[in-house]
């Protein structure tokens, strides 16, 4: 069992559920087939909790509960202001329960408690408020001026919105995905990742306490090939949002295609940082070291390819090597931990496998990386950060690794840097680092991706749309005002004038 000596009483009590149950139609229930699975503390490799394992029959119950709530609970038809009040109440509860939610998130994912407390959990409350307020300000009925007719368009919620979410930012992504769908008046079914179901289930307690009607939010934990596949294939859903790997994204899109259900895919990335020679190499190295070690590199949009101008290559590499070597790797609950473990043994095998393959095919280690031993935690899934360099076709320069591995390349001029970035089939997020803002703007729009950042990386102000193109996704993205509209079905009403 995981070490729970330092957790809050409410967290201990929650984890002691045998199993922790799923939340369907406002009730805490076990799986129809009675199955359970374990979620681990990746910092120790030990069991954190036993969770009810949802399968097709549970998904069916959840979709039916969500449908019933859509039709009968009043959620979809109440004045937007009333819905916004409930979402604000939920946001306040997320704030109030931040310590418990942050502990659960840190324990389940392995991330530093300080990061969960200062980033993941507050962001959920902010997202709920942002979409609640936007919904209040959004006109749902627009007159259309055409001669000979009276016409207008209304925006109606779709019905049941389904979400299949990953393990890297479990609750933050619940916020990004559910907030717009709920603010628009839809009801939801969520299948959290099997590695990290806990914070999403705890969140349901707050949904209940906020007074959101039963069946509006339903959470079915379980595995991708069972619960996930059953949800994606369910004919009773009206919208699907998926965040995860491109491989699974294709399967979800195919399943939704068969039912003609609109689908939003947020997939991976292979983000680049283009560093010109007019920046301070040490300060920029600090920023990129922060990016590649944030969440142990398990961030779809992070800077994984570092393109460094040849004139500052030496000082940049020296500074980055020194800083990466000094990163404090440890258990997420320890206050001096800067980088926690990877989420699972599977993820560690993936990262170490990529390092091995990259080096075996001509890559050169600027900093070797590999397994990390953390005193007191011999069975955690720890790795050390790595820096590689080599040919742009190296597997570590091409594939999404999802770990603290940076691939460095030199470039001589602007055109070369753009060509290198745009070799990637992904198109999520890149950054440009230069003091020349004219050049920054020029390069930013030449990088083919949903997002270009200037002199920063991983920037997510609410209201700026965040989406990927090509292998990184489709269907509209998240975080923008448009995301609310994505969950509102347009309907035209027309009457001939006499
Ligand atoms: P994954 O894509 O398998 O998992 C994401 C979610 O999809 C989980 O909830 C999982 O249960 C579900 N899922 C898996 N198979 C499914 C299926 N057949 N039908 C329906 N749902 C299914 O990702 P995984 O295997 O955990 O990680 C593999 C790689 O994917 C990572 O190394 C990373 O490169 C990428 N990834 C990208 C993420 C992002 O934020 N864009 C998040 C997680 C992973
Ligand atoms: Mg876990």
Image (cartoon, helix red, strand yellow):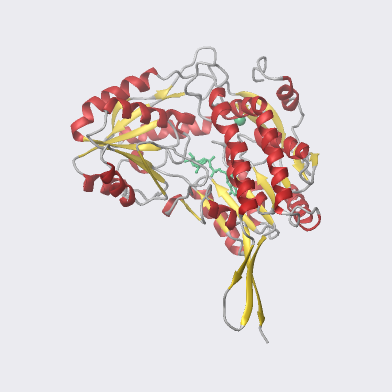
Q: Position of residue 337 (x, y in %)?
A: 50, 19
Q: Residue at x 77, y 41 (%)?
A: 31
Q: Which quadrant of the render holds ligand 1?
A: top right
The residue lying toward the viewer, choosing from 117 and 474, is 117
Residue 486, by quadrant, is bottom right
Q: Is residue 196 above or below residue 422?
A: above
Judge from the rendering whether residue 79 lies leftward or rightward of residue 343; answer left or right: right
Judge from the rendering whether residue 485 lies leftward or rightward of residue 433; answer left or right: right
Q: Position of residue 142 (x, y in %)?
A: 61, 66
Residue 187 in view in this figure:
yes
Q: Position of residue 246 (x, y in %)?
A: 48, 49
| Quadrant including the N terminus | top right
Residue 112 in view in this figure:
no
Total numbered labels placed on residues in the image: 0
Q: Position of residue 233 (x, y in %)?
A: 64, 56
| Quadrant including the C terminus | bottom right
Q: Is residue 189 above or below residue 333?
A: below
Q: Residue at x 80, y 53 (%)?
A: 73
Q: Residue at x 57, y 20 (%)?
A: 44
The residue lying toward the viewer, choosing from 112 and 283, is 283
Residue 288, by quadrant, is top left
The residue lying toward the viewer, choosing from 151 and 189, is 151
């Amino acid at each position: 069992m995981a070490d729970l000596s330092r957790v809050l009483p409410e967290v201990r009590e929650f984890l002691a559920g045998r199993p922790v149950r799923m939340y369907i139609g406002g009730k805490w229930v076990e799986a129809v087939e009675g199955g359970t699975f374990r979620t681990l503390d990746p910092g120790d490799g030990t069991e954190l909790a036993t969770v009810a394992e949802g399968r097709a029959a549970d998904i069916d119950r959840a979709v039916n509960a969500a449908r019933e709530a859509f039709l009968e609970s009043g959620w979809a038809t109440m004045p937007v202001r009333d819905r916004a009040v409930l979402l604000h109440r939920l946001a306040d509860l997320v704030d109030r329960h931040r310590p418990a939610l942050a502990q659960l998130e840190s324990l389940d994912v392995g991330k530093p408690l300080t990061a969960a407390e200062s980033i993941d959990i507050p962001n959920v409350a902010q997202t709920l408020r942002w979409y609640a307020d936007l919904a209040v300000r959004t006109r749902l009925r627009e007159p259309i001026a055409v001669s000979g007719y009276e016409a207008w368009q209304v925006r109606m919620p779709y019905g049941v919105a389904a979400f299949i979410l990953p393990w890297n930012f479990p609750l933050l992504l619940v916020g990004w995905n559910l907030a717009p769908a709920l603010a628009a008046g839809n009801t939801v079914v969520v299948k959290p990742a099997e590695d990290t179901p806990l914070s999403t289930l705890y969140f349901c307690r707050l949904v209940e306490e906020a007074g959101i009607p039963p069946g509006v939010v339903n959470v079915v934990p379980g595995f991708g090939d069972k619960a996930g596949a059953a949800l994606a294939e369910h004919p009773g859903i009206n919208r699907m949002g998926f965040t995860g790997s491109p491989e699974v994204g294709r399967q979800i899109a195919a399943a939704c295609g068969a039912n003609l259900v609109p689908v939003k895919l947020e997939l991976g990335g292979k983000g680049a940082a283009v560093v010109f020679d007019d920046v301070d190499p040490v300060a920029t190295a600090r920023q990129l070291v922060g990016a590649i070690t944030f969440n142990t590199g398990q961030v779809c949009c992070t800077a994984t390819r570092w393109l460094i101008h040849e004139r500052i290559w030496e000082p940049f590499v020296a500074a980055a090597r020194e800083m990466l070597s000094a990163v404090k790797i440890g258990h997420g609950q320890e206050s001096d931990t800067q980088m926690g473990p990877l989420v699972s043994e599977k993820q560690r095998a993936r990262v170490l496998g990529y390092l091995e393959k990259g080096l075996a095919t001509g890559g050169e280690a600027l900093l070797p990386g590999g397994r990390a031993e953390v005193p007191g935690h011999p069975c955690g899934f720890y790795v050390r950060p790595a820096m590689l360099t080599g040919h742009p076709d190296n597997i570590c320069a091409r594939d999404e690794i999802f770990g603290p591995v940076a691939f460095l390349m030199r470039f001589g001029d602007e055109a070369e840097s753009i060509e290198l970035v745009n070799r990637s089939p992904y198109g999520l997020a890149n950054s440009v680092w230069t003091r020349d803002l004219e050049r920054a703007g020029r390069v930013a729009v030449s990088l083919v991706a949903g997002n270009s950042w200037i002199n920063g990386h991983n920037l997510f102000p609410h209201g700026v749309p965040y989406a990927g193109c090509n292998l990184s996704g489709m269907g509209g993205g998240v975080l923008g005002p448009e995301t609310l509209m994505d969950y509102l079905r347009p309907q035209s009403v027309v009457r001939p004038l006499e």
